[in-house]
Structures are given as structure tokens and as C-alpha cells.
């Protein structure tokens, strides 16, 4: 019988491989669209991070005052 | 990306460049899963210059004329910054020459062969480039014998071995 941890790892590897195969099977146009979506998500995440940092800096400045 | 490819095709038809091929992550996504990138890398063959000077100015001027917006070293078409790179090394020249004719949304274009994408990535040698080569290998998206032959010719054997070890 397989060790439960090995079994879990094997399931993860199979899931990863099938996800990669699914992603690979998409057309070039679909893949480029997904890159565009990644870029939009990245921009939104960076903007949110900048905003959160600015808010934190603002709060830190106020608490020092 | 369609606008960028149309502009590249116009560069060829108007004689500003001799030919081009898409490389980098966008080129790789033709063969393997999509990976995050913020630009399109277009490798171009420049026409012979009578004085032997390599300048990208005519390309940037033409791309602006076709509706591109110059931003630092890129020319933006819609969402996509286009980076123009030249056949600066013999490997890149070979990669452009042997690129395959494909279509993107009905627009004819050219993409590096998988083996050249891997060899160029090995030559560039950043962590993300090695990772990309590993994906090509894992996904069986590259002809190993053809890649080995290129790797041998361009002195990239050690780098290739390192990537294969990490597989």
C-alpha cells in the first residue's frame, strides 16, 4: 500500500500535469488573452499594494504626530 | 497583439526590415502554456546598411507612423509593448531565418522554432529562461535531438545539462 504522503504527492503531480496539458492545449490566441488577463491582474495587485502602503505610511505618520 | 503583428508585417512589406520572428514568452506560448510577460519580443533582420551602421531609428519611426506609441525602448500597440531586438548573435540570426510561418487570429506571422526558443533562453541564461526550457522539456514540446545539435553548435551544452539535471 502507498504511503499517504506519497499518495497525496502523486495526486498533486497528476493534477498539475493535467492542468498543464489543459493550458497547453489552448490556442495561441487564447494563451495570449490569458497573458493579457495576468497583466491586468498584476497591475491591479500592484496598485492595491501601493495604496495599502500609502495608507499605512499615512497612519504611521499620524501616530508619530 | 493583432495590431503589433500587423505593424511588423507592414515593416516587412514596406522594406524597413527584411523579416522578423516572435521569440520570448509570447513566442513560447505558441508551443507551451502561457507564462506571464509584459511585452512582445520581435527579432528583426535589418536591411543591409551602406555604411554598416545598425540603427533602429527607421523602425521606431515607421512603427509610430503605423499607430504605435514609443515608450522607452518599447513601441506600444494597444495593451502590448513591442520590443524590437536585432539579429545580434549568430544564434538569433539562425532563429529568425528558420522561424515558422503561423497565424494569430488570421494574421500571418512568424515564430521561432521551439528548439531555437530553448537555445536562445539558454543563451540568455536568467532563472526564468531556464524555467521556460524546463517547461518545454516537461511538456515534450521540443525535439531533443534537434535542440542538442543547436546547443552543441553554440556552446550551450553545460547550460542545457544544468537544466536537464534540475528536471
Image (spheres, coloured by chain):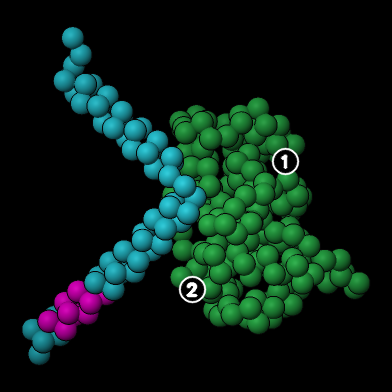
Residue B53 visible in image:
yes
Q: Residues within 10 Å of mark 2 (few under 14, many from 20)?
A: some
Secondary element at image label 1: loop
Q: Where in the figure is residue B19, as x and y percent of width and height?
A: 74, 59
What's the magenta bit mostly, secondary-structure-wise?
helix
Residue sitting at x 64%, y 43%: B113
Q: What's the mark number on residue A48? A: none
Residue B130 visible in image:
no
Secondary element at image label 2: loop
Residue sitting at x 46%, y 70%: B79
Check if residue A61 falls in the magenta segment.
no
Subunit under mark 1: B
- Position of B121 relative to B145 (above/below): below
The chain letter corresponding to cyan is A
- Rendered hue of chain B is green
Asked whether the beta carbons under mark 2 and mark 1 sit within 8 Å of each other, the answer is no
Q: What's the mark number on residue B154? A: 1
- Position of B17 relative to B152 (above/below): below
Residue sitting at x 42%, y 58%: A33
Q: Residues within 10 Å of mark 1 (few under 14, many from 20)?
A: some
- Look at the image and give the residue range highlighted in magenta: A50-59
* Quarter of image, res B68: bottom right
Q: Where in the figure is residue B35, as x and y percent of width and height?
A: 43, 51
Q: Where in the figure is residue A41, as x and y percent of width and height?
A: 31, 64
Is B53 on the left-hand or right-hand side of B1?
Answer: right
Q: What's the mark number on residue B78? A: 2
Residue in front for this viewpoint, B103 or A60: B103
- Earlier residue among tags 2 and 1: 2
Subunit under mark 2: B
User: Marks 2 and 1, how far apart in space?
Assistant: 36 Å
Q: Where in the figure is residue B129, as x and y percent of width and height?
A: 52, 48
Amino acid at each position: 500500500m502507498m504511503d499517504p504522503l506519497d499518495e497525496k504527492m502523486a495526486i498533486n503531480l497528476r493534477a498539475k500535469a493535467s492542468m498543464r496539458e489543459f493550458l497547453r492545449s489552448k490556442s495561441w490566441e487564447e494563451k495570449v488573452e490569458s497573458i493579457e488577463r495576468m497583466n491586468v491582474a498584476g497591475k491591479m495587485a500592484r496598485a492595491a499594494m501601493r495604496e495599502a502602503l500609502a495608507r499605512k505610511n499615512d497612519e504611521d505618520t499620524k501616530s508619530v504626530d | 497583439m493583432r495590431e503589433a503583428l500587423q505593424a511588423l508585417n507592414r515593416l516587412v512589406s514596406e522594406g524597413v526590415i527584411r523579416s522578423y520572428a516572435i521569440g520570448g514568452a509570447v513566442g513560447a506560448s505558441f508551443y507551451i502554456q502561457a507564462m506571464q510577460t509584459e511585452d512582445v519580443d520581435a527579432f528583426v533582420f535589418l536591411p543591409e546598411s551602406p555604411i554598416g551602421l545598425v540603427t533602429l531609428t527607421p523602425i521606431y519611426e515607421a512603427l509610430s507612423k503605423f499607430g504605435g506609441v514609443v515608450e522607452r525602448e518599447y513601441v506600444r500597440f494597444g495593451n502590448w509593448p513591442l520590443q524590437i531586438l536585432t539579429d545580434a548573435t549568430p544564434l538569433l540570426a539562425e532563429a529568425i531565418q528558420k522561424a515558422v510561418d503561423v497565424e494569430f487570429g488570421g494574421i500571418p506571422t512568424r515564430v521561432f522554432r521551439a528548439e531555437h526558443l530553448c537555445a536562445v533562453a539558454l543563451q540568455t541564461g536568467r532563472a526564468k529562461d531556464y524555467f521556460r526550457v524546463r517547461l518545454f522539456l516537461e511538456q515534450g514540446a521540443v525535439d531533443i535531438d534537434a535542440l542538442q545539435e543547436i546547443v552543441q553548435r553554440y556552446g550551450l551544452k553545460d547550460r542545457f545539462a544544468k537544466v536537464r539535471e534540475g528536471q
